[in-house]
Amino acid sequence: MAKLIKKIHIYLGLLNLSIVLVFGLAGLKATFKLGGRGMPPVTATRYEPFTVPPSLADDTAVAEHVRAQLRIAAVIHDVRRDPDNNLAFAYYTHNGPHYVTILEKENRLRLAIHQTGMWSFFDNLHATERRDMKDWRVQLWAWYNEFSIWSLIAMALTGVYLWLASRPGFLWAQISFAVGAGAFLLLYFVAR
Amino acid sequence: MYRWLRNTHLFLGLFSCLFVLMYGISSVAMVHTSWFPRRPAISESRITVSAEAASSARALARELMDRHGIRGELVGAQTTPDGFRFRISRPGLHHFVTYSNGSAEARVEKRVVGVIHTLSDIHHVSGLESEDWLANVWGFFIGIVSVGLIVLALTGIYLWFKIHTERLTGSILLAISLGYSLTVMLLLRTA
């Protein structure tokens, strides 16, 4: 039994190596506010010819059409109207927000890209949870994230099992568990 | 070296165990919201406020904290057509406060969520600069666990490599894992 559990623990660790590192980096970013705060600056702006297809009935359909045409790997998007009543979309990607404004009278669109740094990129990777977005790259990562969530739970449980099955009397291991679990439970109940 | 790294892996893993489980379980709850619908227990009260406290969301929040024992972080402060509203939140417990200009009372809606959603709230606690000391303590431990995850991953690779019988299968799994994740990461970063 312990041999099988050990295999599971090792294999899950190997299959989740990069995402566990991503989780760790995202935690460091959140703790120390690494990579700055607030909206990243505009790093690129460009205009492209664009005409709203007459077959698209509502703004959400136009948003999806534009996303597909520009191949934006958006996790979520917002649809709104700017002060000049132009249709405007905010696409939130792992690299930062992309703002698209449809300039219907000019038959073109304006794309403004706010590129984030690597710390925010890792943070966005760790938070990818939706699997219903159209972009296939986002879907691939979201499925990997889902797999990693279950793996993380399994690795924690199998890790404890392996300790209890091999060296339950190891004092420093007992102290490590007691300190970690004690701190968590104390904080949890004080927070409640 | 092997023994030292094995012990480091063990100690960090055991220390981080409940924190990691919290992250895992709360992530499941956040991804599968239909499995864990958020149904808070709601109660409402009206609290008399002083004239000074009625001047701003921050002043009112301070009075509610100092005189009425409400704890947590002030978030979501907004002005409304006839006053302002905000939330004082801590894991599992949220006070939604609404104040109308000229009124002597603030309306306070208290929402208490269950264990799973408390874990989800804790999942989002981070940083060391909160006004709430408890959030800072959580943030400190989250920082330790974050470093712990990185060390666990790296020591885990070393420990696996030292088990000769697992090298072939492990190498295949690692190649699949890195091939998939790094490719998707690169695609997303260059998108």
Image (spheres, coloured by chain):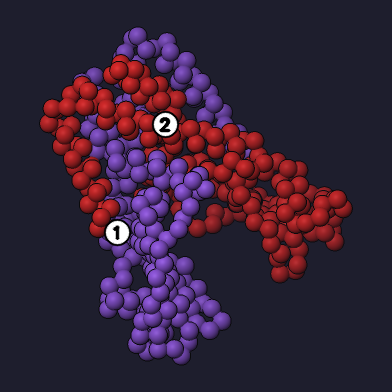
For label 2, the residue is A151
How many C-alpha atoms fall within 10 Å of the one at disc 1: few (<14), some, or many (≥20)? some
Name the residue that disc number 1 marks: A192
Would you say residue B122 is visible in this rendering? Answer: no
> Where is residue A55 shown, x and y percent of the image?
86, 50
Comparing A98 with B85, the one in front is: B85
B14 lies above or below A133: above
Q: Is residue A33 above or below residue B4?
A: below
Residue beneath the point at 26% across and 47% down: A184
Secondary element type, mark 2:
helix
Local crowd size for mark 2, using a 10 Å CA cut-off: few (<14), some (14–19), many (≥20): many
Q: Chain of mark 2?
A: A
Say which quarter of the image contains residue B93: bottom left
Colour assignment, chain A: red
Chain B shown in which color?
Answer: purple
What residue type is disc 2 on?
Ser
Type of amino acid under label 1: Arg
Q: Position of residue A92 (x, y in %)?
A: 60, 50
Q: Decide: is A149 above or below A100.
A: above
**Image point 75% across, 51% down: which residue?**
A61
Q: Position of residue B58 (x, y in %)?
A: 39, 76
User: Quick one: label 1 or label 2, which is nearer the N terminus?
Assistant: 2
- Quadrant location of the C terminus of chain B in the rendered image: top right
Q: Residue at x 66, y 39 (%)?
A: A135
Q: Residue at x 27, y 61 (%)?
A: B133
CA gap between label 1 and label 2 equals 28 Å
A66 vs A141, left or right, is right
Give the percent coordinates (x, y) of residue A46: 73, 50
